[in-house]
Image (tube, grey):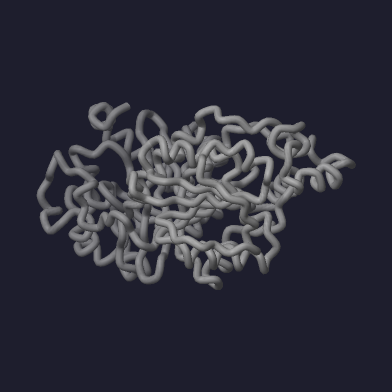
Amino acid sequence: MNRQEMRNSFDKNIARDVLFEVKEVLDKCGVEFFLIGGTLLGAVRDKDFPQYDFDIDIGVKQETLIEKMPELEKEFLSRGFQVSKFSTPYPFDRFMKVSKNRVTTDITDFKLVNDEYIHIFKFNRGCFVFPREMFDNLGEINFLGKTFKIPTPVEKVLEHNFTVSWTVEDKDWNWETSPCLKWGYSNMRSQYFVNPLHVSSARDYQGRMTPDKPENAKIARQFGFDFWDGERKYGYGGYKDDGRWYQVAEKMIKVYGLTPESKVLDIGCGKGYLGKWINKLGGGEVWGCDISDYALEKCVIPNKFKFEAGKDNLNDNYDLIISITTLHNLLLPNLKQAIQQINEHSKQAYICVESYRNERELYNLQCWALTCEQFLRPEEWQFLFDEWGYKGDYEYIFFE
């Protein structure tokens, strides 16, 4: 449904029952939550849901929501809710929508960054940003006969969210005009370019963990024909340009503001399909480098050179340096050198590495990986980025 259809179908009596049941689930699972957005506005100003609202808005601190997500999903499903989870641009599920009787509740994550709580808006670099003190000392409000927690001081929160005119009903309110919405927020470094491609591929994890895997890994690490175009047990099983990198190139051009005058380097470019699309779509002059002679022979971009990341040094500077599923193949000292090289020679940077969040994903990664040297959790990657002064963007892929 579009927004107007949701407004037309929003029954306040049904919404009240849904809100109460959502509260039951969150309380049962031990999740501290608070009213936010239009629901908070209605609770304070109207003592009811706002006239032109179309959903229920609830906030949860991110570290709590991530931990409780599986338990919440199970409980909501058992009660007949439809559940959708979202991760972008984070590498983990971070907020959820639950729907019942044509009423949707957004259970939204708030992440503490320095002295601000933020929530990402529309999967991009826009963020709703609130001072930390608004969420550190939650207050309470009686809403529709039940007690709910709210950020405080609530009048300042609503002014921060809706402007000083929050006391006046506005049926044409648009979240993109919110005073607390910041675009290009500097603390947001996690991206979501590769994950849509990664999760679309089927993998038989157990099938790759065979007695001959050590020998297969040895062959894969030569990065020759077998790795790129040989049997699946050695690597890609045939690496072809099926157009999938078009969408990644298109998004990168937009996010990094690339123009035909930009200069881009892809470290670990392989056959150069991403670089080809960046160039075709007007993202500038693209250079590719790789350790693989076979990949460079097949590489479809003209500007290419052999390069062993973590050992060789870059000579030129670039508007953007990218490296996708390459750096986790390096030993730790070489990884440090590679990241520092990227920092020194780029105005902007993006790297994508393999990672895991739990024991199942670690097992799957260990089964699947042939060339990986660094089996690290996201917080371990983040520690290394901070230790080595990496200022660029990053993305993690997981093996679920």
Q: How many numbered discs, if any?
A: 0
Q: Is residue 68 visible?
A: no
Q: Residue at x 78, y 36 (%)?
A: 233
Q: Position of residue 235 (x, y in %)?
A: 72, 39
Q: Position of residue 147 (x, y in %)?
A: 34, 55
* Foreground pick, 117 / 231: 231
* Foreground pick, 292 / 144: 292
* Foreground pick, 371 / 365: 371
Q: Residue at x 28, y 65 (%)?
A: 152
Q: Is residue 280 above or below residue 133?
A: above
In the displayed structure, does residue 353 sit left or right of residue 33? right
Q: Position of residue 91 (x, y in %)?
A: 53, 50
Q: Position of residue 212 (x, y in %)?
A: 88, 41
Q: From the image, which quarter does the N terminus lie in? A: top left
In the displayed structure, does residue 346 sit left or right of residue 282? right
Q: Is residue 187 visible?
A: yes
Q: From the image, which quarter does the C terminus lie in? A: top right
Q: Residue furthest right?
A: 211
In the displayed structure, does residue 90 sit left or right of residue 143? right
Q: Residue at x 29, y 54 (%)?
A: 183
* Foreground pick, 142 / 220: 220
Q: Is residue 337 above or below residue 126?
A: below
Q: Quadrant of residue 254?
A: top left
Q: Quadrant of residue 215?
A: top right
Q: Is residue 298 above or below residue 23?
A: above
